[in-house]
């Protein structure tokens, strides 16, 4: 098995395991995406009756917003590589009473959809985690109708996003995980360079490529909530912490709490975050 294939298999397994936590912590994720989701649906230029595809849908929040905008005559296709994520998205659609949503297990780099079959594609915080983002965008271009829109969001530079480094930084210093370098492949900051992100869209054949910065702060009531959310949503943290004994876990938790001090406010914790949004269209 080559390196990319091994990564895809490990990624699928990790996100399958993480699905329950993402469903449980949906409220925290939605707070962080308070500006991101409207950016995605707005730049996708959604209208009633359209067909929308969401890639790496997770538990489906962006797709649910899209479903309300395209209305009963439209359709949203939620896709994710992890069956448990797809099941969570279906539960969310049922809870909201949406009957214009379907969800399918699908590889974003190999879309099982006909050419020119969707009007818009959205992807929230997924493109930077793919083994081959260029292959994904090539598939997006194929399935979009002429003039169809792409709107995707990734995480911006690490210096603008201290929220993951609080936990992961301690784990790196403890020698439990390796730091990600500039050529480390897929990861949170793999597409954090605005010029590279724009070039990726242009090289894929899209027109009118624009890249925006979007505030995406993570807010928590206290350190307990931060710990619970970040150590379960992060597949790397969850895998690592699961192997440790209670004493070492307690030491790591104390170090994490100390690192949260700069982010404490009268209302809880606010950890800054910045996403990069890329929007484009398939040429006519």
Image: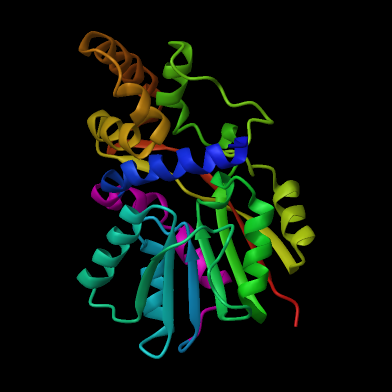
Using the image as rendered, state which of residue 171 and residue 45 is in the foreground. Answer: 171
- State whether residue 75 is above or below residue 202: below
- The picture places residue 127, in percent across and down from the top left corner, at 57, 52
Residue sitting at 39 percent across and 39 percent down?
14
Question: Which portion, as a residue range, is magenta?
Answer: 23-47
Q: How is the image coloured?
A: rainbow
Q: Residue at x 55, y 79 (%)?
A: 118
Residue 77 figure quarter:
bottom left
Image quadrant holding the N terminus, namely top right
Image quarter of residue 255 = top left
164 drawn magenta: no
Residue at the far front: name it: 1
Main SS of the magenta part reads helix
**Is 60 left or right of 183, judged from the image as shown?**
left
Q: Position of residue 42 (x, y in %)?
A: 53, 72
**164 with respect to 160 (left or right):** left
Is residue 28 in view? yes
Residue 269, image x and y in percent?
33, 35
**Is 136 in front, or is 114?**
114
Residue drawn at (39%, 20%) of the image? 259
269 up-or-down from 21: above or below:
above
Choose top left, top right, bottom left or bottom right for residue 284: bottom right
- Indicate yes or no whether the magenta region holds residue 27: yes
Q: Is residue 79 above or below residue 84?
A: below
Q: Residue 160: x percent and y percent?
A: 56, 37
Q: Is residue 188 visible?
A: no
């Amino acid at each position: 098995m080559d390196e990319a294939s091994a990564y895809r298999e490990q990624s699928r397994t990790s996100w399958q395991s993480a699905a329950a936590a993402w469903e449980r912590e949906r409220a925290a994720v939605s707070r962080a995406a308070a500006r991101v989701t409207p950016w995605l649906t707005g730049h996708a230029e959604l209208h009633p009756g359209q067909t929308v595809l969401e890639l790496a849908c997770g538990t489906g929040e962006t797709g649910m917003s899209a479903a309300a905008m395209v209305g009963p005559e439209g359709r949203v296709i939620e896709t994710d590589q992890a069956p448990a994520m797809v099941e969570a998205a279906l539960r969310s659609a049922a809870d909201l009473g949406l009957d214009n949503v379907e969800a399918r297990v699908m590889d974003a780099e190999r879309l099982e959809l006909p050419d020119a079959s969707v009007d818009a594609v959205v992807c929230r915080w997924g493109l930077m985690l793919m083994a081959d983002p260029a292959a994904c965008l090539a598939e997006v271009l194929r399935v979009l109708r002429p003039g169809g829109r792409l709107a995707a969001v990734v995480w911006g530079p690490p210096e603008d996003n201290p929220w993951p480094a609080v936990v992961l930084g301690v784990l790196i210093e403890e020698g439990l995980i390796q730091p990600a370098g500039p050529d480390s492949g897929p990861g949170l900051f793999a597409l954090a360079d605005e010029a590279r992100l724009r070039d990726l869209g242009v090289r894929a054949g899209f027109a009118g490529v624009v890249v925006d910065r979007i505030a995406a702060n993570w807010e928590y009531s206290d350190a307990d909530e931060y710990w619970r959310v970040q150590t379960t949503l992060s597949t790397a943290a969850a895998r690592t912490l699961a192997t440790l004994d209670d004493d070492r876990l307690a030491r790591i938790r104390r170090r994490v709490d100390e690192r949260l001090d700069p982010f404490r406010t009268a209302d809880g914790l606010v950890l800054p975050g910045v996403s990069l949004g890329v929007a484009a269209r398939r040429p006519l």
